[in-house]
Image (tube, grey):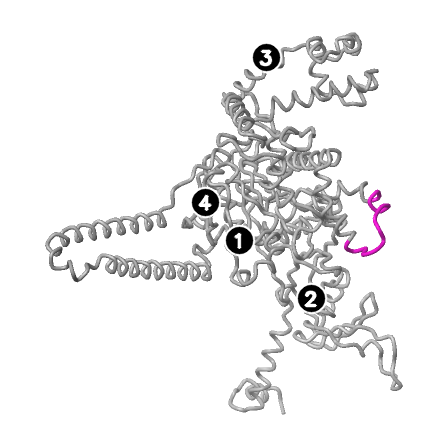
Amino acid sequence: MSTAEQQPAETSPSSNSNSSSYYDAVEAEGANKYELVSPHWFYCKLVDSRERWIPFSVQDSEKLEIAHQSGKHSLDLVVPTEGGRYDVYLKKRLRCAVYWEEAESEVRRCTWFYKGEKDNRYIPYPESFSDELEDAYMICVTLDEWKKKLESPTREIIILHNPKLMVHYHPVATTDDWGASPTEQGRPRTVKRGVENISADIPNGEPLQIDHLVFVVHGIGPACDIRFRSIVQCVNDFRNVSLSMLPAHFKKAQEQQQIGRVEFLPVNWHSTLHTGVDVDLERITLPSINRLRHFINDTILDVFFYNSSTYCQTIVDTVASEMNRIYLLFLERNPDFKGGVSIAGHSLGSLILFDLLTNQKSTPNGEEDKNEMLVTAPEDTKCMKDILTELELSEYCSVFEREEVDRQALALCTEKELKDMGIPLGPRMKILHYIRNKSSNQNSKGLTPAASGEGGDAKQEASVTLTHAGTGCRRLDVMTGQVHANYPQLIYKPQIFFAFGSPIGMFLTVRGVNRIDPDYRLPTCKGFFNVFHPFDPVAYRIEPLIVPDVEFEPMLLPHHKGRKRMHLELKEGLTRMSMDLKNNLLGSLRTAWQSFTRTSLPAVEAGATGDAEPELEAETNSVKQTEEKTEETATAVKEEPTPVNVGMLNGGHRIDYVLQEKPIESFNEYLFALQGHLCYWESEDTVLLLLKEIYQTKGISMDQPLP
């Protein structure tokens, strides 16, 4: 048959055989079109002692691809990723943390993937072998020749059956009697081309604009949640929750480009503390119950370390120096940052921050700072001779003159330095005691320590009120039980201090502080929020220390969806119903009893009817009016609770905020006590409170204010 005769038959769809050959030709023609694969960048992370490949965000992957395509990676370009918290060294293919210590991660430009052995996650091939697979795939598509077999660098076999079926065989060590190829005996795994063909959760990326910076300090131990994760991982969760809250509650401000995001950076002090002390602890730790003892040494002992003057100094120095270092590095990497700074602490970390903040010095710009200078001026005018005369140590004046030690230098002297100067033990103790007391008298006012006897309390409170009027804000010291340390100064003024699951109230009470002056405020920080879960065994309240004579509940933190949890509403409804039934029953009994006691005797009923009825009616009306007024007053009190003045520690606003427990947590408080102390990192309600208060300082409100 000639070609001219075949042509009409092939193009005519009337015949079934000709129709199938026609569509096969169209499909083959479409299949021969090769399209370049779109690469995506991944990094390797160790999760639960297993390697896991995690995709960069769409935004970061595009940045890395642009830098890669520029051809300048030979110069070892550094590309900031994940909001500037990690740098990727393109030539070395390494991802490095910027603000904290963390192991380096391998980075890959990924195009081909195979399914893992123990889970359904896809693992990217090395870049060089991915290029080989892509070349083989291009030849198969172009020539329409499949069943292509390739061998990986680890001697594993990959077979390209067709565009939708590509498998990966792992080698098997043994062979059978039939002599089958060992490389094809393993269980086949799926091979995919392109990141769009695998189930990977790829985020879009974070807003470039940073509105506010928050430092987060951890509590005891290296693990911060029930899954024993580090502070870096927990803060990552906290940051991710905040990013999800912004479009849900600040959508209008985002659309108007008024806000970007809030950056949360972790501060780690545990590793520095345990660098040297763990060796000493190991020598004295008993060998029995090894895991429990190791856990206690690594966690519980942190509380005792903080109450030791030696290790307390190490902890506060580490926390302050880390926050100052990270802040300067952040400004260096974000020169356009104009936002404020806040700090947050969990558990013992909140106590560390509270002690740091109470010992900060205000700059002498405001009126209260001038007043503080006026109050302390008479004390500061003393010369060395006057001080030594007061201590009955005037015979050592020549020693201090020879060493050129003045009043300021004396305040910095340590016991070792005084000993090197030739000062005997007794005079050294007098001088050191004077230095501590002088620091206490200047700085520790605003908090009322407990004292024995009513006269002692009145005297202390009077002195505190008098000196506080001149200074505005004071600091804690050894006089109120606080461990004596030289508290370093922060190079910035935090706007708000957030405490999560905080034992501050308990520690103040143990230190002997039974009352906080209502006018007391932190020297450099205007806001203070104490957030806790109702079942948190470590958390304590602050407001009863300010208003000890009034009983009132903490503020219930609204649910992030704008309502109370259903089980709490049900509980309140049942409580209200039972109270109504109780009141109605008591009212009925009271009426019956009154009618019974006021019933006249039959012998005198006829003679007393005319005189008794007006009096009885008047008395009954007065009782009814009294009961109605009482019920109305009680209802008004329930609906509109009396506002409580909780002082100036949070600028006149409430301080204690309690989370709403989940329905399952309400069944048994003890089972969820530990979870209650570690729940803050993934709590939407906690994150929303932070965002609400932070953006309120910028004059930005939520779309719909929560009740």
The alpha-carbon separation of the residues under discs 2 and 4 comes to 55 Å
| Residue 286 in magenta stretch | yes
The answer to the question of whether label 3 and label 1 lie on touching residues, with beta carbons closer than 8 A, is no
Residue identified by numbered label 3: 378
Sequence order check, earlier mark of 2 and 1: 2
Sequence order check, earlier mark of 4 and 1: 4
Say what secondary structure mark 1 lies in: helix
| Residue 513 in magenta stretch | no
The answer to the question of whether label 2 and label 4 lie on touching residues, with beta carbons closer than 8 A, is no
Say what secondary structure mark 2 lies in: strand
The alpha-carbon separation of the residues under discs 3 and 4 comes to 43 Å
Q: Residue at x 69, y 14 (%)?
A: 407
Residue identified by numbered label 2: 122
Tell which of 314 and 390 is nearer to you. 390
Which amino acid lies under the numbered mark 4 shown in the image of this protein?
Answer: Phe
Q: Nearer the viewer, mark 2 or mark 1?
A: 1
Say what secondary structure mark 3 lies in: helix
Sequence order check, earlier mark of 3 and 1: 3
Residue identified by numbered label 4: 552
**Above or below, 57 relative to 144:** above
- Residue 478 is situated, as x and y percent measured from the top left of the image, at 66, 29
Sequence order check, earlier mark of 2 and 4: 2
Residue identified by numbered label 1: 684
The alpha-carbon separation of the residues under discs 3 and 1 comes to 52 Å
Which amino acid lies under the numbered mark 1 shown in the image of this protein?
Answer: Glu
**Above or below, 633 relative to 479:** below
Q: How many marks?
A: 4
Query: Which stretch is magenta?
Result: 279-292
Sequence order check, earlier mark of 3 and 4: 3
Which amino acid lies under the numbered mark 3 shown in the image of this protein?
Answer: Pro
